[in-house]
Image (tube, rainbow, N blue to C red):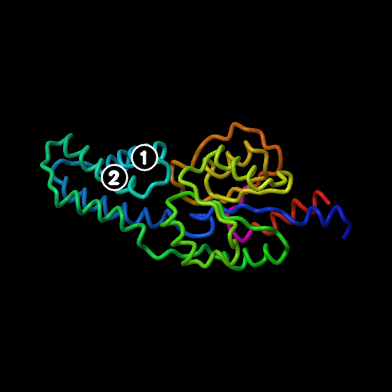
Amino acid sequence: MNKQTNSLSKQTLLFDMDDTLIYCNKYFDAVLDQFFDLMKTWFRSYRVTVKEIRTIQNEYDIAGVAKSGFVSTHFPKSLIHTWNHFSTLTGRDTSKEEEDQLWKLGMSVYEMEVEPYPGMIDTLNQLRDEGHELYLYTGGEAVIQQRKIDQMKLKEYFDDRIFIRQHKSIDALEDILKQLDLDRLHTWMIGNSLRTDVLPALTNGIHAIYLKQPTEWSFNIVDLDVKPQGAFYTIEKLTEVPSTIQQWVSNKA
């Protein structure tokens, strides 16, 4: 292997965490199913449909993230706002007991035990063994995200190379790239969100791997109106990351 291939082989890889390395959205979906069941019971006589409830909750949910970032309280607030919306619309009486029940239900999503995506450990082991430098770049509240990191023992792979941001944006990623003084020709962002992973990566001139999910939270879906300066791959399994990186390295060698 020549010197050029050696220099190409080692890449800097920034991994998203939620719904890239570990499951996340399915826990919110499980809580939402409970919420929809409650709302159907409470508003049965008013003929409010699950589709209507889902639409309003999603609007409040996305608005909360857009305004405050990934703050834990915005999800339970979206349930309460939706409940208030339909209570006002139908004239149904509200109660403190129901509001408290919704708050507790919304916050319960952060207490669930997380689980890794298939192949997470093997993928990270392989990339580390191949000499790549691994970073974790996740969005959310520090306490909640750190709990997940600890549960999954991710520090074994990322050590102190972990960044937790309330807002994942173009500017937030740019700050990290500048802080670390990374070589953008050999730096990758790997994640499931077009909005918070792929778009910032392409805008900031680094490579991107989009881990496409069968179903995705609508907040994460945006049009990509930026031309990639480097590589941009779409994959469907986390375990495809090493071969995707190797494919690019081989093509450049």
Q: Horizontal placement of 57 versus 2: left or right?
A: left
Disc number for residue 180: none
Q: Hey, what amino acid is under mark 1?
A: Gly
Which residue carries the number 1 mark?
64
**Front-most of 57 and 71?**
71
Q: Is residue 103 above or below residue 117?
A: above
Q: Secondary structure at mark 1?
A: helix
Residue drawn at x 60%, y 51% is 190
**Image position, residue 224 (x, y; %):** 58, 35
Which residue carries the number 2 mark?
77
**Image position, residue 53 (x, y; %):** 27, 42
- Report, in whole angstroms, how far the alpha carbon at label 2 lies from the one at label 1: 9 Å
Give the mark count. 2
Residue drawn at x 65%, y 57% is 241
Q: Horizontal placement of 162 versus 250: left or right?
A: left
User: Furthest-top residue in view?
Assistant: 225
Residue drawn at x 81%, y 54% is 7
**Image position, residue 49 (x, y; %):** 24, 43
**Front-most of 103 and 28?**
103
User: Furthest-right residue in view?
Assistant: 2
The segment highlighted magenta reads: 234-240
Q: Quadrant of residue 67?
A: top left
